[in-house]
Image: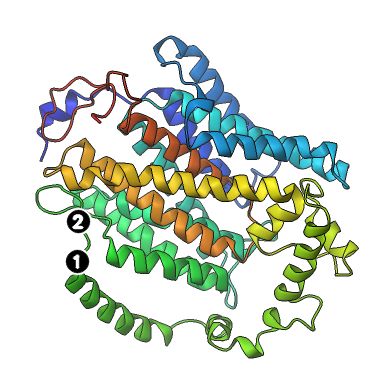
Amino acid sequence: MPTAAARVSLPPVPVCVTAVAVMIMVMVGKISEWVPGLAAIPIVKIAFLIAAISAFRNRAALPAVRVRSLRIARPAVAFMMLAILSVSFSIYKSNTLILSQLILILLLSMTLLLKVTQTLRDVERLLLGFAAASASLSVGLILNYHGGRAAINDNFDPNDIAYALDTALPIVLALRPRNSRLGWSALSGLALLMVLSVLLTGSRGGAIGFSVITLLIVAFPLSRDRNGAVKRFSLGRTVGKFVVLIAAAAVIWGYLPQATQERMATLLNLQNDYSADSNLKGSRWAIWQRDVGMALERPIGYGLGSAEAVDGLGGGQYRAAHNCLVQVFVELGALGLLLYLYSYLTTWRNLGRISQLARQASSGGQDAKAALYARAIRIGLAGNLAAGFFLSQGYSAALWMLVATAAALVRITLPARGTPPAVEPSEASPQATVAGVRS
């Protein structure tokens, strides 16, 4: 356990980083959309302005970061730019212009995050922003639950809540401190509340995403051993945990609300699920078929925010795509879909490079902590993609702010070749200079 002196030697996280973490909480947690009295206040824009002003005032202490030079950031930025520029070929220009403002704020927020993040402790603060966002969504849902399928209010789709919680759940588990029982218990309690919230939403896409996350966490634990190293895959431990997990799921099933049980049961009986009935215009399978057919007729796309209009043009009922990949393909064409998928792939691969540190770090240093966070973000991305396959969340702040955080983590942990790596104090050597993470 670090001594009091070791903890004191750590400098405070810059105010601009904390401001960006608050911005993440506001954007992903959507606190203004359910807390009474906040709906009329543009909290997201205010949070962004505060973070931007704070970064500007601290600009002399910030390193020069070329966002376009970051492997993870390049496809993400290109995707955002394509979404904004799609107004030039959009069939629904008014809607594209309105949504472009939100995409621009998201793009600027991602850039700001990459500019201010300097150390692993900064990344940790950003991840706490995701945890706070999860607390906002979970608490809001539980407080407004009155039976049946849970939802906060008319501003929220239960499926979208489950999507965001799936994305952040691995992060919350990875953030649990090893040396604080109170902190460990608080974050573990939040994780349980998030799981309960996902189940109460009755979101089948959310349930699939949660299942993917659960299986990965069982196989690749989000915790460290007694020496501080990230726990590795163990076949025997994984099989044992699976048995316990199945038994626990069987017990929990009996306590779920009837509405939740009925919706989840359709996952095992797709033949009787309206979503799989191609004869119903409103079924997801029929929507996907229509939308993909329309996208193939116009590979450049129909413009940001046009998916519902395209469904109507294809003979449908002006429904949302209910699939991130279909949504992006329809709106931004083949290039947009390529950039979207490549963003997932390059983020996954580069985080995997950090995970290699887990095999080298034999003690509880910063390399091991970075590897733990990289593993958590990878699992979160897997759950995000699984849940997003059934939702129109192609431009979600939960996804793209997490991608930006991953890019910052990679930049800090794996400095460019020829660049002297900065060093941040580890749990093993608290007297080291605070500036980065040893590669």
86 above or below 295? above
**Residue found 17% across the figure and 43% down from its top:** 360
Crowdedness of circle 2 by 10 Å Cα count: few (<14), some, many (20+)?
Answer: some
- Marks 1 and 2 close (CB-CB < 8 Å): yes
Residue at numbered disc 2? 231
Residue 373 placement (x, y as % from top left): 32, 46
User: What is the quadrant of residue 406 in the picture?
Assistant: top left
**Residue found 20% across the figure and 58% down from its top:** 232
Q: Nearer the viewer, residue 384 or 32?
A: 384
Residue at numbered disc 1? 234
Q: Nearer the viewer, mark 1 or mark 2?
A: 1
**Residue 6 relative to residue 281: left or right:** left
Name, please, the residue furthest toward the top. 60
User: What is the quadrant of residue 10 in the picture?
Assistant: top left
**Residue found 26% across the figure and 56% down from its top:** 185
| Helix, strand or loop status at disc 1 | loop
Amino acid at the residue labelled 1? Ser
**Residue 124 relative to residue 51: left or right:** left
User: What is the quadrant of residue 125 in the picture?
Assistant: top left
User: In whole angstroms, how far apart are the C-alphas of marks 1 and 2?
Assistant: 9 Å
**Residue 155 relative to residue 28: left or right:** right
Crowdedness of circle 1 by 10 Å Cα count: few (<14), some, many (20+)?
Answer: few
Amino acid at the residue labelled 2? Lys
